[in-house]
């Protein structure tokens, strides 16, 4: 293997390195694969554009190798561009117990914990020294039906949630548009689409129902349906976890954080000084609200999120439209 690796690095043979990575994975030669990852990165630093081989080797280590090697790939955090964060990749195929002993302390360790929680592991007994997210370490009831993405060797299979069986609704005149922490949090769900890709988004808050909020986005015709908070949660987390057309995928841990942040803002609990709010308190607030998915007939072939939320207690509604496409 060493002779092949030396040769491929010397002549800058990216295809040869990718074939070598496949062979090493098939043979479960994880130490050699780790060598490919590290030396491809070093070659890139010398001016040879071999970072795709280094990225792919790190991805395969995080996905397929035993916990010790997967954790070391996470610790190196050396990808230039990857299909998904290595924290998410490693957590998709390893339990916390398999990874925990070899992960360094710090934010990456915390993200792996939250990725495992997203996949249903109860880690409430785990202590986190440095936690950038601060979310509960067990899923709330409304989160448990969300399907995680299927991370594979060469792709991430994470289709958008279904939006079937929408009904036509008449739209009233637009309301008086305002912006608040809720509209900001809605747009933050798709910030990767808009800041790193071709995406665009708009969000409004109005007095009135969901149709008034949708109309205030400049929409003339709409099909929509009311959904449960559990179903809506799948849409929120999917959008916030996705990189859209060209952005770097943030991963499900960060996607879950943005969904929580959005829910807290819409529920009016963001003025409290405690993060996160009590799960029961947030659940009660969310179940009092009405959640809508809608379509104005302009759904692109790319990524889209069109939702509306009603707070019948305060007479407020919010609506978001967002999309991203490949050129």
Image (cartoon, rainbow, N blue to C red):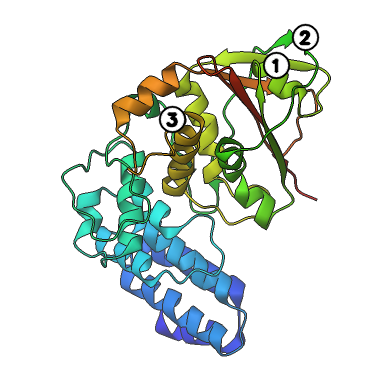
Residue 279 located left or right of residue 323: left
Disc on res. 146: 3
Q: Alpha-carbon distance for marks 2 and 3?
A: 31 Å
Q: Alpha-carbon distance for marks 1 and 2?
A: 8 Å
Q: Nearer the viewer, residue 129 or 316?
A: 316
Label 1 vs 2, first from the N-terminus: 2
Label 2 vs 3, first from the N-terminus: 3
Disc on res. 211: 1
Residues under numbered marks 1 and 3 in contact, where contact means CB atoms less than 8 Å apart: no
Label 1 vs 3, first from the N-terminus: 3
Disc on res. 70: none
Disc on res. 170: 2
Image quadrant in which the N terminus is located: bottom left
Circle 3 crowding by C-alpha within 10 Å: few under 14, some 14–19, many from 20: some
Residue depicted at 69% across the width and 23% down the height = 213
Residue 214 located left or right of residue 284: right
Residue that sits furthest to the right in the current view: 220
Residues under numbered marks 1 and 2 in contact, where contact means CB atoms less than 8 Å apart: yes
The answer, for residue 223, to whether it is visible in the render is: yes
Disc number lying in front (1 or 3): 1
Residue depicted at 58% across the width and 77% down the height = 50
């Amino acid at each position: 293997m060493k002779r092949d690796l030396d040769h491929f690095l010397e002549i800058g043979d990216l295809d040869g390195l990718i074939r070598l990575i496949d062979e090493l994975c098939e043979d479960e030669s994880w130490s050699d694969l780790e060598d490919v990852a590290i030396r491809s990165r070093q070659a890139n630093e010398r001016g040879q554009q071999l970072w795709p081989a280094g990225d792919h080797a790190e991805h395969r280590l995080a996905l397929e190798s035993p916990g010790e090697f997967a954790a070391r790939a996470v610790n190196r955090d050396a990808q230039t561009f990857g299909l998904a964060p290595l924290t998410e990749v490693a957590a998709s195929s390893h339990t916390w117990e398999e990874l925990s002993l070899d992960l360094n302390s710090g934010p990456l360790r915390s993200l792996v914990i939250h990725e495992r929680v997203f996949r249903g592991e109860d880690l409430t007994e785990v202590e986190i020294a440095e936690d950038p997210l601060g979310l509960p370490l067990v899923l709330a009831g409304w989160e448990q039906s969300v399907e995680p993405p299927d991370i594979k060797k060469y792709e991430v299979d994470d289709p958008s949630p279904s939006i079937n069986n929408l009904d036509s609704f008449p739209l009233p005149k637009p309301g008086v548009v305002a912006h608040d922490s809720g509209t900001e949090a809605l747009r933050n769900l798709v910030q990767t689409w808009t800041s790193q890709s071709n995406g665009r988004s708009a969000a409004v808050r109005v007095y009135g129902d969901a149709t008034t909020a949708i109309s205030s986005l400049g929409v003339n015709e709409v099909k929509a349906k009311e959904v449960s908070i559990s179903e809506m949660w799948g849409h929120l987390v999917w959008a916030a976890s996705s990189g859209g057309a060209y952005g770097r995928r943030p991963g499900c841990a960060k996607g879950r954080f943005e969904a929580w942040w959005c829910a807290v803002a819409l529920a009016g609990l963001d003025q409290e000084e405690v993060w996160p709010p009590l799960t029961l308190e947030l659940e009660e607030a969310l179940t009092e609200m009405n959640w809508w998915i809608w379509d104005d007939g302009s759904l692109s072939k790319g990524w889209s999120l069109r939702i509306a939320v009603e707070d019948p207690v305060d007479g407020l509604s919010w609506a978001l439209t967002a999309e991203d496409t490949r050129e």
